[in-house]
Image (cartoon, grey):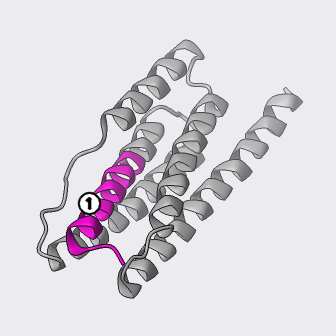
Amino acid sequence: MVDNNDVIAILNELIETSKDGEEGFRSSAENVEDARLKEFFLRRSQEVGDSVRELQGLVRSLGGIPVNATSIGGTLHRRWIELKTALTNNDNLAVLNETERGESIAVAAYESALELALPAEIRAVVLRQLEGAKRNTGLVKQLRAVYEAETALR
């Protein structure tokens, strides 16, 4: 089993990744005009924000200080979404593709954390949040398929 400091470090990495997702969904909402997508992205941002706060609570309960910032990579990814959207005139498919890419990074981070011998109560939270990230990825894929079909009909 990993020691307390390692658990705190792992949770802080997940917080950073999740903050990236929260901000990524918010950025995606800002970069689409479609009301359905805007609402979807804002709802996902709120849900991921709830996950961030839960992880931060776990870090505090372990005596650690939770991170409260996004990663440099996440910031760069959001800037890429903004640039790509600007270049493609608020293309919903471009935003969905970039959002899916961001969520796949979150899934990989959670799966990596679960490879470690985490305490049972922490493992349960990480596993539940992994399922949420997978659900988000699946929903984004479904939306992308809908928008691809709509684009093909034009």
Near-viewer residue (139 or 69): 69
- The amino acid at mark 1 is Ala
Q: Secondary structure at mark 1?
A: helix
Q: Is residue 49 left or right of residue 81?
A: left
Near-viewer residue (68 or 48): 68
Q: Main secondary structure of the magenta part?
A: helix
Please tell me whether residue 88 is drawn above or below residue 108 in the rendered image.
Answer: above
Residue plotted at (31% across, 33% down): 72
Label 1 crowding class (10 Å Cα cut-off): few <14, some 14-19, many 20+?
Answer: some
- Residue at the extreme right: 153
Q: Is residue 136 left or right of residue 1?
A: right
Query: Residue 148: x and y, percent?
Result: 79, 36
Query: Residue 23: x and y, percent?
Result: 36, 44
Rendering quarter of residue 34: top right
The residue segment tinted magenta is 1-22
* Quadrant including the N terminus: bottom left
Indicate yes or no whether the magenta region holds residue 2.
yes
Query: Residue 51: x and y, percent?
Result: 37, 67
Residue for badge 1: 9
Rendering quarter of residue 137: bottom right
Indicate yes or no whether the magenta region holds residue 68.
no
Near-viewer residue (33 or 147): 147
